[in-house]
Image (cartoon, rainbow, N blue to C red):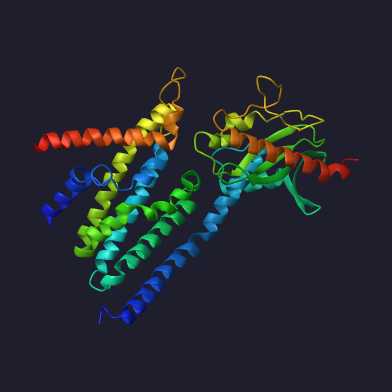
Amino acid sequence: MRESPWFNLVFMFIITAVLTGILSGIYEFTKPMIQTNEDIAIKKAHLYAFNIEYPSEASSDEIEKIYYDKIQVETIDETIIYVAKGTDNQPEAYGFNFAGGALWGEIEGILVLSPDLEKVIGIDFTEQNETPGLGGRIDEPEFKEQFRGVELNSDGAPLIYRTTSQPGQVDAITGATLTSNSVLEIINETIERAKKNLGGDRG
Amino acid sequence: MKNEIKTITEKDLWTENPVIRQILGICSALAVTNLMANTFIMGMGVTFVTAFSSMTVSFLRHVIPRRIRMMVQTLVIASYVIIVDIILKAFLPEISANLGPYVGLIITNCIIMGRCEAYGQSNPPLLAFWDGMMSGLGYTLVLMFISFIRELMGFGTLFGIPILGDWWTRWTIMVMPASAFFVLAIIIWAVQARQSNKSV
């Protein structure tokens, strides 16, 4: 009986049902936790890009509170824009999501600009799969910190890498040219888009 | 039983170590060994999956039809791998982000199916569990050793804690997967030399 094809089929069917059943149970049980983790990771990245400090041991509730105290989410022309407002309710910084392909896969993150869109406040990545130790170093403070307070070029590309033959604002990562170039390209595109989006209401 | 446990431990950790003697699990030995913290979690994941898959296959060994046993084993292994993935995402989100796709790829680790086939399906559950756990640990030990060398030379740190000062020039090659080939080959050579000396 054990060698009959029907038994094989029924056996496979039952064991698949049982195992997937158990898995769905575990998945359902941990789903809220996983979503919270992902959400908090994104909020932390945003706070970092906005240069808003938060205690490193902060619980997820505290992070949420700090986040919504400082940052408002608005939609202009179907684009999500994060706005940090000061005490007098004047915008202090605008944040824009960015996404694009790099060497190994999609890079996602947030770019924060000053209200006049002429200075970078900060950047952070929420998703990247670049080579660890090389392209992956875009996610290290050493790389991200150099964008803080950088003045954008008014003509040509807003941001340029510094090389021996050409002045620029930021350094690329040695040994990760493709990743570095992709990041710069994505960020420059985002800046152009931001200028278009907010061009009108800057008056 | 006691003897069996001792033999299994000795075989899996040393004389028949899955990585060094059976050359299994090489793929992840190259991929996740540039940081010790990641390697440790990966090792624990593989150990968990190997132990429980082997035990589950052993429980079902009298019912599984021979012809479809590999399908069943794959299914069992895949289930445990997904459990590890979900647990990491829920409780250790940062490590999960670091390991990226490699957690899901535990399923392709030949050690796991190897143990199910070679041991789990013909031995009682508790011994199968022990055998799986020891094989996983044998794998973890070798990987930890590789990552020790790679992280120290590539980043100057161990478990992310700076060990070597600024004078140390980081070996970028040690961060790249290719360096694991060199380190692994040297380890295999050293262990084989030692083991063959002994048997003479």
| Quarter of the figure with residue B28 | top left
Look at the image and tell me whether residue A52 can be seen: no
Q: Nearer the viewer, residue B132 or A29?
A: B132
Q: Position of residue A78 (x, y in %)?
A: 78, 54
Outermost residue toward the top in this view: B167
Look at the image and tell me whether residue A171 can be seen: yes
Q: Position of residue B136 (x, y in %)?
A: 29, 49
Q: Nearer the viewer, residue B115 or B159?
A: B115
Quadrant position of the N terminus of chain B in the picture: bottom left
The residue that appears at 29% across and 40% down in the rendered structure is B142
Image height of B173 relative to A40, above or below? above
Q: Position of residue A71 (x, y in %)?
A: 72, 45
Image height of A29 relative to B159, above or below? below
Outermost residue toward the left in this view: B200
The residue that appears at 22% across and 72% down in the rendered structure is B62
Quadrant position of the C terminus of chain B in the picture: top left
Q: Position of residue A62 (x, y in %)?
A: 61, 46
Q: Nearer the viewer, residue B187 or B159?
A: B187
| Quarter of the figure with residue B122 | bottom left
The residue that appears at 34% across and 45% down in the rendered structure is B26
Image height of B83 relative to A73, above or below? below
The residue that appears at 48% across and 43% down in the rendered structure is B98
| Quarter of the figure with residue B130 | bottom left
